[in-house]
Image: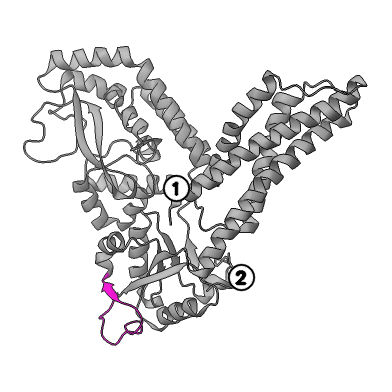
């Protein structure tokens, strides 16, 4: 099961479909539209416009499909959802091409515009969707036959956990779940799954179990009395790209929280990792790269000045680097211009404060204007950070925050940022208690993430910096 190879199949067919559809459409324009306009048969000549079309349009369509999130999960595709997603993307792309390339065509009748639009849409949609339908149908058939499987872990040792396991196993068509074992929250004696699956350990060992067994899907089947344990497990797994499903209770079914995606499947709630619409995530990522690269290029003379200033005013390296915790709890190296003396943390780790004696005179200037964080754009360019997101913290402080607010782990769903809602609203935190208070703003950001919110945070950040306030 090679995910990259399967993804490549979709990409190659999308490229071929865009080339073939434009070629046929080009011939249609010559034989039908232009011939009617001029009153005689126009010879088919492949001009520069044709070659530009087959060179540029494939990348245009790949970009649209990428922004739509089509290539994200290539093994678990619903053919009905695929039909709607392909239709919407092709329609949107056809509108862009029509108004940018075809609207200035000279035509005999106004209805020819409609002919051009619907012909291009029909060709592009048909030639794109048919190969997709074939590939997806083949993949789905392989899943149903058990040829493609996803390592699955059950969390729970009660009767419901056993029923879910047996119901999934006895289905005529495989769901693709390959059960490798179960995790128990209680004593392992006389549990319901012991005769069917291997006991792998306790919830505290989840990370190790997931890594060792390459788990792709987790089914949480705990009792209603174990709600707190369920929340802890979801908090832990929410920082991964693993599919999480839980057993719904009758209240959740009656209130419409349980949405079925497969008619014959077991009723389970799938916990969504998607915080922003996929197309917004892709645009956010593109903005991060473009803005970061541009900023590093434009500010290169300023960075040279800051480097000289740091060297002349205090001994030590120009850059300060330290390990921070990023998305999914993965550590990365954060870069900043050094604003403190070299031995600033000789007595242990400590957060900076307003009148911190460890900060150099030149460092105070950089901190007030946020110039010390320009190297953060390099972290964004590398993919460790984003322009907007919760500020990255050290493991030392995260461990303390989690004791007071376990839901801090939700922040690790996304990349940390150069600026955040928490910083704009609260500012710098000088201790763990203030970090915990600032946490609610970052949680609110995650619950309301959008490009619109990102732009507002960036604008307010710039305004605050220009006013000389400390954030």
The answer to whether residue 308 is visible is yes
Give the residues in magenta: 186-202
**Residue drawn at (31%, 12%) of the image:** 301
Q: Is the magenta stretch mostly helix, strand or loop?
A: loop
Quick check: is 188 in the magenta stretch? yes
Task: State the residue position of label 1.
Answer: 4
**Residue drawn at (63%, 49%) of the image:** 131
Query: For mark 2, does the 10 Å Cα neighbourhood hold few (<14), some (14 to 19), or many (20 or more) residues?
Result: few
Q: Where is residue 302 in the image (x, y as percent from the top left)?
A: 30, 14
Quadrant assignment for the N terminus: bottom left
Task: State the residue position of label 2.
Answer: 263
Place residue 45 in its image quadrant: top right
Q: In this view, does 297 lie to the left or right of 349?
A: right
Q: Viewer-proximal residue, 219 or 414?
A: 219
Query: For mark 1, does the 10 Å Cα neighbourhood hold few (<14), some (14 to 19), or many (20 or more) residues?
Result: few
Please, is residue 14 above or below residue 269 in the view?
above
């Amino acid at each position: 099961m090679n995910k990259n190879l399967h993804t490549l199949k979709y990409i190659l067919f999308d490229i071929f479909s865009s080339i073939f559809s434009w070629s046929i459409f080009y011939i249609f324009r010559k034989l039908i539209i232009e011939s009617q306009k001029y009153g005689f048969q126009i010879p088919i000549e492949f001009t520069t416009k044709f070659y530009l079309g087959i060179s540029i349009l494939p990348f245009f369509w790949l970009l649209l499909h990428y922004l739509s999130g089509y290539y994200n999960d290539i093994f678990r595709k619903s053919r009905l959802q695929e039909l709607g997603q392909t239709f919407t993307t092709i329609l949107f792309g056809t509108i862009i091409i029509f108004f940018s390339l075809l609207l200035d065509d000279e035509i005999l009748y106004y209805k020819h515009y409609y002919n051009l639009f619907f012909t291009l849409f029909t060709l592009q949609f048909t030639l794109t969707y048919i190969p997709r339908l074939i590939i997806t149908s083949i993949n789905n058939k392989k899943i149903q036959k058990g040829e493609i499987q996803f390592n699955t872990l059950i969390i729970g040792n009660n009767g419901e956990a056993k029923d879910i396991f047996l119901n999934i196993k006895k289905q005529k068509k495989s769901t693709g779940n390959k059960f490798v074992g179960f995790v128990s929250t209680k004593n392992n004696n006389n549990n319901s799954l012991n005769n069917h699956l291997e006991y792998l350990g306790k919830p505290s060992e989840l990370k190790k179990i997931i890594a060792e067994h390459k788990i792709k899907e987790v089914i949480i089947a705990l009792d209603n009395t174990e709600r707190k344990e369920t929340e802890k497990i979801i908090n832990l797994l929410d920082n991964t790209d693993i599919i999480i499903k839980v057993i719904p209770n009758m209240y959740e079914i009656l209130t419409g929280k349980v949405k079925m995606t497969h008619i014959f499947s077991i009723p389970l709630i799938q916990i969504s990792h998607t915080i922003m619409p996929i197309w917004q995530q892709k645009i956010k990522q593109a903005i991060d790269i473009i803005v970061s690269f541009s900023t590093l290029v434009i500010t290169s003379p300023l960075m040279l000045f800051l480097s000289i200033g740091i060297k002349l005013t205090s001994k030590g390296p120009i850059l300060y680097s330290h390990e921070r915790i990023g998305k999914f709890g993965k550590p990365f190296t954060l870069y900043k211009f050094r604003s403190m003396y070299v031995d600033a943390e000789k007595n242990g780790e400590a957060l900076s404060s307003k009148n911190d004696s460890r900060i150099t005179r030149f460092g105070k200037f950089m901190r007030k204007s946020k110039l010390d964080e320009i190297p953060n754009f390099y972290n964004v360019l590398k993919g460790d950070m984003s322009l907007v997101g919760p500020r990255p913290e050290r493991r030392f402080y995260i461990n303390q925050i989690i004791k007071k607010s376990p839901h801090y782990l939700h922040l690790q769903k996304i990349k940390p940022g150069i600026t955040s809602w928490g910083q704009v609203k609260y500012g710098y935190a000088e201790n763990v208690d203030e970090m915990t208070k600032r946490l609610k703003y970052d949680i609110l950001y995650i619950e309301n993430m959008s490009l619109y919110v990102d732009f507002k945070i960036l604008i307010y950040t710039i305004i605050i910096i220009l006013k000389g306030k400390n954030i």
